[in-house]
Amino acid sequence: MALLTQSRNKVGYSTPKSLRVFKVWQHLKNNPWGIGVREILLSPAGASPERVDEGLSPLAGEARTRAAARAALEGRKKGLLAFLPFLGPAFIACVAYIDPGNFATNIQGGSVFGYNLLWVIALANLMALLLQTMSAKLGLATGQNLAQLCRQEFRKPVVYAMWIVSEIAAMATDLAEFLGASLAIHLLFGLSLLSATLVTGVATYLILQLERRGFRPLEAVIAALVGVIAVCYVIETFFSRPDWGQVGLHTVLPWLGGTQSVLFAVGIIGATVMPHVIYLHSSLTQQRIIPRSEKEARRIFRWSIPDVVIAMGLAGLVNMAMLYMAAATFHAHGQSNVADIPSAYQTLTPLLGGAASLVFAISLLASGLSSSTVGTMAGQVIMQGFVGFTIPIWVRRVVTMIPAVLVAAMGFNPTTTLVISQVVLSFVLPLPVITLVMFTRRRDLMGPLVNKTITTCTAIACSIVILGLNGWLLYATFAPLLGWWLPS
């Protein structure tokens, strides 16, 4: 595997034949369904692997995207048309940053502390933007995703331990996302929470089936759902009429009022930087558009940066809208006890009207469906990368929805479950963050896309902040239970 990675960095860029062999190998090893190989084999030895007979494959849209990207790289397309083929992966990744866990933490933070914690969202989003850019670069430079590189670089006992922990994180994430969608269906249609979980399972499975038709249809659906969430919060902004002076001030002015606000701040960061999507983003770029030279690798990476900036910027604005909506609606009206999603839904009606509650529930549904779909994809990447095998997507969908079904059947509070899932993620977050920094600073793996010194230093600083805050969250969560000291 190391030789294949090396050949990509030093040989595969300039030899179409070796590139084609490498791409076939990647499909066989990494594609959960084993599709797309036929088109590569049928392409002429000296021709672009992206130029395939679209009639031979159900992945015509994928082939067109790769052909358009090749035209841009060769200078045959310019302007916006040259940029469009490189949009997509970050929009799938950004869904994890506006999942139902963010709804819970942002609504609680806004209702209790008003606009004061907006700066935390801005900081968390900047850190997430850096990490996701590095993850996208890792997949592009090496042709492997983060989990595969861990399997290549570490010993088997370590790899299996990392796999188990990462699977727990993926399931905890999926629990939060799945419950969010189920809760939205329950609020919108009056179904019992248990029935809503079954509907959510079917809906997310149907969305996942789009990946059989290539990456483009799935990217389009996920981007559309992200757009629905964004439009919903534009409408909520109109209804809630926030104080824009306060929004601007507290976006850049750090504030921490005490232990409780620190816990909320850490919870917001914990709900923002997601371990499973760091693995996933490297997988989304590893086969999407394969460079033939170091120059092309640099150009593809430059074109992928706007994808990350636009998608993550949109996610950050949505998160900020969640918090300032709660501040302008709940905190401003003395409703600082809005501690869960159903309470927020019910409180919006007397304060802003039924339309505001409806828009809120629709945004929650779009968030839950899209993020649960992405969480299932991440689980497949984690399993295949760490241990080299996959299970049918319907099996993973059924297995990962079991915890949500149990929560619904046993009558647990869904929002409390969302918060607990964020604590579980705090245990796992160090693994992808540390390994991502380790790998992207190595020239033997990254070639021309190796981190610059300032990038590595910034990433290390972000990692220290994230890991320190997550450590504090874990301590503050368990200290009262164990009788340990906790500042008042």
Image: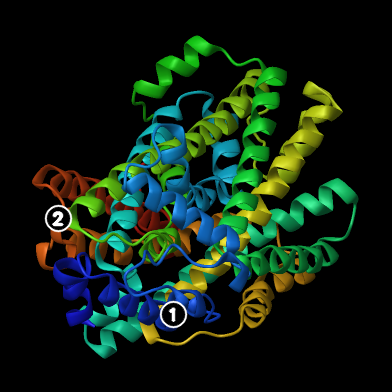
Image-quadrant location for residue 135 = bottom left
Q: What color scheme is it?
A: rainbow
Question: On screen, 257 above or below 228?
Answer: above
**Quadrant of the frame with the C terminus:** top left
Provide residue 223's location: percent of width, then percent of height. Answer: 59, 46
| Amino acid type, label 2 | Pro
Looking at marks 2 and 1 on the same chain, the residue that comes earlier in the sequence is marked by 1
Of the pair 208 and 104, the residue shown nearer to us:
208
Answer yes or no: is residue 485 visible: no
**Which sits in the foreground, 139 or 314?**
139
Which residue appears at 69% of the width and 62% of the height?
207
In the rendered image, is residue 188 in sight? yes
Mark 1 neighbour class, 10 Å CA radius: few under 14, some 14 to 19, many 20 or more? some
Disc 2 target residue: 448
- Direction from residue 273 to residue 395 in the image, left or right: right
Q: Is residue 359 left or right of 436 when viewed as pictured?
A: right
Residue at 13% across / 46% down in the picture? 457
Q: Position of residue 369 (x, y in %)?
A: 68, 56
Assign a secondary structure to mark 1: helix
Name the residue carrying label 1.
41
Question: Left or right of 391: which side holds 363?
Answer: right
Residue 383, quarter of the rendered image: bottom left
Q: Residue furthest top?
A: 245
